[in-house]
Image: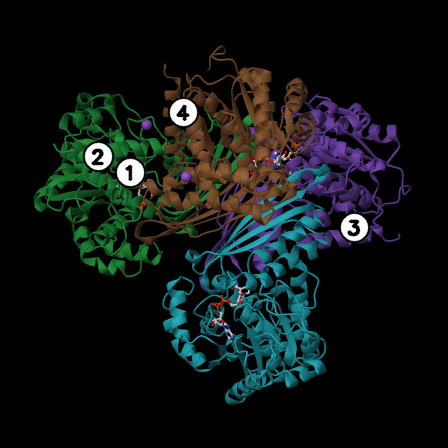
Chain colours: A purple, B cyan, C green, D brown
Amino acid sequence: MTDPDNGGLVGVWLIGARGSVATTAITGAAALRDRIVAPAGCVTESPEFPDSGLPEFAQLVFGGHDVAETPLRKRAEQLEHAGLLPRGLPELVSADLSAADSRILPGIADSEQHHDRQELVAELVRDLRSFRQTHGLARVVVVNLSDTEAPHPERAEHSDLRSLRRALREQRQEKVLAPSSLYACAALLANCSYADFTPSTGARLPALDELARRNGVPYAGSDGKTGETLVKSALLPMFSSRALHIRSWSGTNLLGGGDGRNLSDPTNVTSKTSSKHRVVDESLGYPVDGRVHIDYVPDLGESKTAWDHISFAGFLGNGMTMQFTWQGRDSALAAPLVLDLARLLSRAHERGHRGALRELGFFFKDPVGLDEHRLPAQFEMLRSFARELGKDE
Amino acid sequence: MTDPDNGGLVGVWLIGARGSVATTAITGAAALRDRIVAPAGCVTESPEFPDSGLPEFAQLVFGGHDVAETPLRKRAEQLEHAGLLPRGLPELVSADLSAADSRILPGIADSEQHHDRQELVAELVRDLRSFRQTHGLARVVVVNLSDTEAPHPERAEHSDLRSLRRALREQRQEKVLAPSSLYACAALLANCSYADFTPSTGARLPALDELARRNGVPYAGSDGKTGETLVKSALLPMFSSRALHIRSWSGTNLLGGGDGRNLSDPTNVTSKTSSKHRVVDESLGYPVDGRVHIDYVPDLGESKTAWDHISFAGFLGNGMTMQFTWQGRDSALAAPLVLDLARLLSRAHERGHRGALRELGFFFKDPVGLDEHRLPAQFEMLRSFARELGKDE
Amino acid sequence: MTDPDNGGLVGVWLIGARGSVATTAITGAAALRDRIVAPAGCVTESPEFPDSGLPEFAQLVFGGHDVAETPLRKRAEQLEHAGLLPRGLPELVSADLSAADSRILPGIADSEQHHDRQELVAELVRDLRSFRQTHGLARVVVVNLSDTEAPHPERAEHSDLRSLRRALREQRQEKVLAPSSLYACAALLANCSYADFTPSTGARLPALDELARRNGVPYAGSDGKTGETLVKSALLPMFSSRALHIRSWSGTNLLGGGDGRNLSDPTNVTSKTSSKHRVVDESLGYPVDGRVHIDYVPDLGESKTAWDHISFAGFLGNGMTMQFTWQGRDSALAAPLVLDLARLLSRAHERGHRGALRELGFFFKDPVGLDEHRLPAQFEMLRSFARELGKDE
Amino acid sequence: MTDPDNGGLVGVWLIGARGSVATTAITGAAALRDRIVAPAGCVTESPEFPDSGLPEFAQLVFGGHDVAETPLRKRAEQLEHAGLLPRGLPELVSADLSAADSRILPGIADSEQHHDRQELVAELVRDLRSFRQTHGLARVVVVNLSDTEAPHPERAEHSDLRSLRRALREQRQEKVLAPSSLYACAALLANCSYADFTPSTGARLPALDELARRNGVPYAGSDGKTGETLVKSALLPMFSSRALHIRSWSGTNLLGGGDGRNLSDPTNVTSKTSSKHRVVDESLGYPVDGRVHIDYVPDLGESKTAWDHISFAGFLGNGMTMQFTWQGRDSALAAPLVLDLARLLSRAHERGHRGALRELGFFFKDPVGLDEHRLPAQFEMLRSFARELGKDE
Ligand SMILES: NC(=O)c1ccc[n+]([C@@H]2O[C@H](COP(=O)([O-])OP(=O)(O)OC[C@H]3O[C@@H](n4cnc5c(N)ncnc54)[C@H](O)[C@@H]3O)[C@@H](O)[C@H]2O)c1
Ligand SMILES: NC(=O)c1ccc[n+]([C@@H]2O[C@H](COP(=O)([O-])OP(=O)(O)OC[C@H]3O[C@@H](n4cnc5c(N)ncnc54)[C@H](O)[C@@H]3O)[C@@H](O)[C@H]2O)c1
Ligand SMILES: NC(=O)c1ccc[n+]([C@@H]2O[C@H](COP(=O)([O-])OP(=O)(O)OC[C@H]3O[C@@H](n4cnc5c(N)ncnc54)[C@H](O)[C@@H]3O)[C@@H](O)[C@H]2O)c1
Ligand SMILES: NC(=O)c1ccc[n+]([C@@H]2O[C@H](COP(=O)([O-])OP(=O)(O)OC[C@H]3O[C@@H](n4cnc5c(N)ncnc54)[C@H](O)[C@@H]3O)[C@@H](O)[C@H]2O)c1
Ligand code: NA
Ligand code: NA
């Protein structure tokens, strides 16, 4: 698969490192390294990605920020109990969990209104630098896996790096940036590549894009594509390649878990439903009726059920429908993609890629720098990018 | 779209010309020519197929064989009543329906055991030649839209053209070929291109392939991909590109209509369920559990409902499921593809293509000459083929 | 079924007489009278209701109020075009449609803020009396089929008849009553029985209940039970009789049509979702998680699709789920119930029943005077009530 | 609930005592006795069955026949692993499992063609008598939970007890009775009440019915109603009470587990699909189109998924559909009913009931002695029967 000796250790720094997705990713990476499990769900482990020079699981060192304090081992046991992690696995990899846990530092919260933003960023930068130095890491990838934020107001200072820097310096008490963007800003300043697995703003500001390009760091996002939207992006090209006209596309998502609880807050959910809907309209090139609901249903636990109803017209105006029910386990779908992103970003960084990595759009609901939402086309882009990464320098 | 003057009239000869699909295709072609309806469902009319030199609808002349005698106009009214054709349309295009009806000749039936096969073929060839001459057609495309046959036993004579010819000559009373193959054989002998929209054997015999290549005629098949299998071929690449492991894929198809009645015969349905299942196994490269049922449910009329249940495993062995319900109107899905096939085959014939046209695999459940079942890849093949067709000679 | 000579003509006065449900009911009553169609969907025509002394279809005379002006014949043609009425039926019963149309008077609208409420009620009473006299009707039943209103604020004056009368007299310009309650009030004053097929307030005020009992008039409501809630009330007793514990019940309703458009207004929909949810909680006796969404999806036309997801626990805490999709045509489900209600209320009125008729709870989502939401129990109540109605006086 | 001192110990003898349902029932009874779990799924524990004099869980003593040898404790652990039994439960009740296991004796198999049938029955009778004596049981209930048999040919000897006795005596080597009937015959001879939870013939022969009545023993059956058919029997009355006409009812059942494997044998499945279908036709009183499929899908493990598609007609012939997906865990649905049946039969036996207990039809797909398939009506029968059982003698 990958060359074990091709470049030392790679740091994977997770924002929200004690969440379900992060815990599953850390546990799974250890299990894959030890070949305890098959690599199902892990795109970069499939036979299509043979020689891209990606770091091996054994090379990954995990750490991160979180505002929660439940130890990783305990979180893993909760997920084991919920049936998400195989029985006995947390125990088998408990050394890895403890090690990663010891590298989790307190994160910053949105409520910290009386903090000096510039100082907050500086602290995060120090955390990342110290992580790199302590463990002798060749590169560090930061992945945002924390709770989805409410949409952050646009501000003039976001438009270029110079204005942003000035604003951070001068309006220190003000919320110039959302927490996700503070994290992204720190990552880029500390020369770490960055991926936003949530729909939060993160690195998606002209000023931060400028920073990434200037510092020679690649970044990717936003919003991991793991369920209803994944299916959408596979079905939309089917309809359009057959010249079938979509009349309406309606969806309801029922989800439990921490993510469900957070999204049950009406302001937070906005970021999500809008990135979910954009896929349809942008893919088809015409506006399509239909709403997307996200409901928190605690008893579903770590599972999620989505129902979609698609009404479409065919030859001579014949109306037809397709419905699907997707019953997924979100963290199990997301975690391997986090590993994929870390491996790909690390290698892309090594190969000198900088700025928005549109070639990673395959992984996201709302791919930065990319208008292409069709899964097959995104997969082709990813494959040729991976081949590129593997070529001799 | 196409150049109206680029080559005179093109004949479209339908086996089963009074069936639902055929009637819908003939009615729809007239409506599209007169721009009464939008070209939904018609692949070759979409913006992706701009300059391929395909014949226009106004250039198509319809005729065919059938064993039924209900006039096309009456069949069209039945389909209007069933809601498949827009109200008033049969009346609007009644001249076209009568004209086509007058070009429908009696077909041959499987039961004709006391007939001389060689003579049967010769008659069919005369029918096709006379159709071409009478209407001054530049080319003729034959499309098999008759009832699905029971699987026909393999015979040694099928393996090469010479043996087949001898067998037809010498074992005149024997069922050397299934009716679909008699039709295909006649088409190829008469220098007509041929498509098999049914799962019947048709041209899929080494001997007939030899004949097609020798006579410089292209052919395509088998079994139009319009419902459950279409969705399968769009979803399978989604699962595999995400490295999700399919554990089982089960399906039930409920259908009314003439096709439903015919498939309620257990021997006829065999051809169908096996071509439906092959898609999954061949796409994934590993055997997948699960059965496909086809049930005749008369009250569904011209509609069809398929339910599929897919069980798959993701990261760390997490089991998940997807289900879908497809509620389609089969003839409305099939008819525009028949027009697409006729246009593409006619042009391919004109450009000198011969033998199995694997590039048309996009249209079929069981694409002849092609192992690729993934819809997106098939669509790419089709698009580049169409671009090729449009290039200056 | 019923005795043709048992008591002259019965008036059926529909509020919203030009809506989809009303038009379907009027058209259908004529078709049933002439035995052009089978009585599917009509409860009182089933063999279970033999000798209840209900008026026959031939005895019914239709009229009503509406704020729309499209003639009934035209509305019927629209519904014919949408496939809701059989082709040709509007023409066959066009005399009935014209006659009913000539008996539709302008209704009152919520926006009429500068009107004298007392005078509005008096006018409605005059309309009803004149209807009865002109046609020599033995009795008149008023059924509210107009658009669902936004919830009307509770007021002290609603608590008894005397206060209400005073308020109407003295606060003439104020919205003491919602339009639905003005209609209900007028009906009861004019000695007409009344049914509220919508979730609007209508007769459900202590003051109006007092009026009904005092005037010897029966009334029924609210909110016709025709789709998702009907299924709920059939499934809930299944779960509880098997001691299966419902954990969550979530639902999404997609509907086109005029009702859909009206319910797409967030304030109007409130009346509906709350009556839809109450059924679950009240039936089970414990609160159940889950939300109900109602989305307007215009391309569904006169159809409606509801998806429900039920999560429940069985033996030893085993979690299981049931999902259903209901694809109904709302007006076709509602219209025969309107006829059932008219027949039953007329007969109940004749037999001296007064006040809230809880025995008709079978027909409603939010049955007035009844806590029993289980369909089988409601059906038993209805059947014994109907038997009662048939007994010799 | 029940009076702990009301009558000593009651034996529950399970045919197929090491199967999934049996193991779950034995484990669950211990857990309920110790109040480790809530009694979800257990009908006789619900508040509707207060004082019927049923034996308590603490009074039940389990034993049985099986042809398998895996100890109960091990079977329970397999079910724990499959998520059917709560984690840790088998350990908690391991003493009960060992005790029950020590009371499981080798069963008889269909293949035993060279055995003397009369002797086989006599042995079974001895087993049952010894069970009763050893444990000082007041009564014994035998419940058949073994694999579903292929339909057994009807024979003249089945028509009365005398002929059956003679046949057993004289045609000793012949398969006069299916194994399920040998078990039933032995139970009745040994004065044990009997329930058939499978669709096998069991006690459903005139000769055995005669025996039951003569010996003063009640029996019940057949085929536990736990999934698709349960839902059917709840939905059918909904459709019929609303006068909605069912046009077709189609179903597909996907199941893993041992039952699934056994039913994948085409001859065994016949007993099942036919009892599943009868419910629809018998309930409605008119024949309904549609087939029922049962597919074995091993990866579903102890779960089962059924999809049903119902097409129905309403007012003015409007066609509508309902679909449902039932995702159940069969053994968790069946096991509590086994306990219900044991308790009810024991009490009924005590109170002198004999012959077919039609009042227990609520529990069965194909209720013996009963034409009523509507769940609500069956539940009413059950409730009044239970009240009856509680009355003072
Ligand atoms: N399939 C998927 O699971 C999926 C798909 C797309 C996007 N996402 C997104 O991924 C994120 C993580 O999902 P999850 O299920 O693991 O959620 P989770 O609630 O289990 O974990 C979120 C973690 O973030 C931490 N956190 C919250 N605010 C923080 C802050 N300011 N700084 C640092 N840490 C903070 C929380 O303490 C928690 O440990 C969510 O935003 C979710 O929307 C998940
Ligand atoms: N979506 C689709 O509709 C779809 C998809 C794939 C394949 N197909 C296949 O297309 C075919 C046509 O479907 P349909 O719905 O129009 O069926 P249909 O029953 O309406 O029409 C079949 C026609 O073939 C005629 N026919 C039968 N035997 C013949 C013979 N020996 N010679 C000439 N004519 C003969 C019949 O008289 C009839 O008019 C079927 O084989 C079906 O399996 C349809
Ligand atoms: N299955 C069902 O169709 C169903 C079930 C339960 C309740 N309902 C309720 O029945 C009602 C009618 O449904 P529909 O589909 O016929 O709707 P519709 O929009 O087709 O008809 C409503 C009619 O009411 C008229 N109207 C509006 N305001 C009025 C007023 N103030 N006075 C008199 N007329 C007025 C409108 O002009 C229109 O003709 C709705 O409130 C709906 O919520 C319908
Ligand atoms: N929801 C449900 O689970 C449900 C509903 C209705 C009916 N049933 C029926 O209940 C039965 C048991 O189901 P299960 O899931 O426990 O199946 P299972 O395969 O797990 O158990 C069947 C047991 O019967 C034993 N057996 C087989 N032949 C025997 C014989 N001749 N004598 C004694 N024992 C024998 C087997 O060894 C096995 O231990 C099946 O017939 C099934 O069709 C189950
Ligand atoms: Na009530
Ligand atoms: Na019966």
- Horizontal relation, residue C381 to residue D190: left or right: left
Type of amino acid under label 4: His
Type of amino acid under label 1: Phe
Beta carbon of the mark 3 residue lies under 8 A of ligand 1: no
Badge 4 marks a residue whose secondary structure is loop
Image coordinates for residue A227, horizontal then vertical, percent? 62, 42
Q: Nearer the viewer, residue B342 or D200?
A: D200
Q: Nearer the viewer, residue B219 or D180?
A: D180
Q: Which residue is mark 4?
A: D353
- Horizontal relation, residue B43 to residue C82: left or right: right
- Give a yes or no on whether discs 1 and 2 share a subunit: yes
Q: Can residue A152 be seen in this snapshot?
A: no
Q: Chain of mark 3?
A: A
Badge 1 marks a residue whose secondary structure is loop
Q: Chain of mark 1?
A: C
Badge 3 marks a residue whose secondary structure is loop
Beta carbon of the mark 1 residue lies under 8 A of ligand 3: yes
Q: Which residue is mark 3?
A: A47
CA distance for labels 1 and 2: 24 Å
- Give a yes or no on whether discs 3 and 1 share a subunit: no
Q: Which residue is mark 1?
A: C197
- Give a yes or no on whether discs 1 and 4 share a subunit: no
Q: Residue furthest front?
A: D170
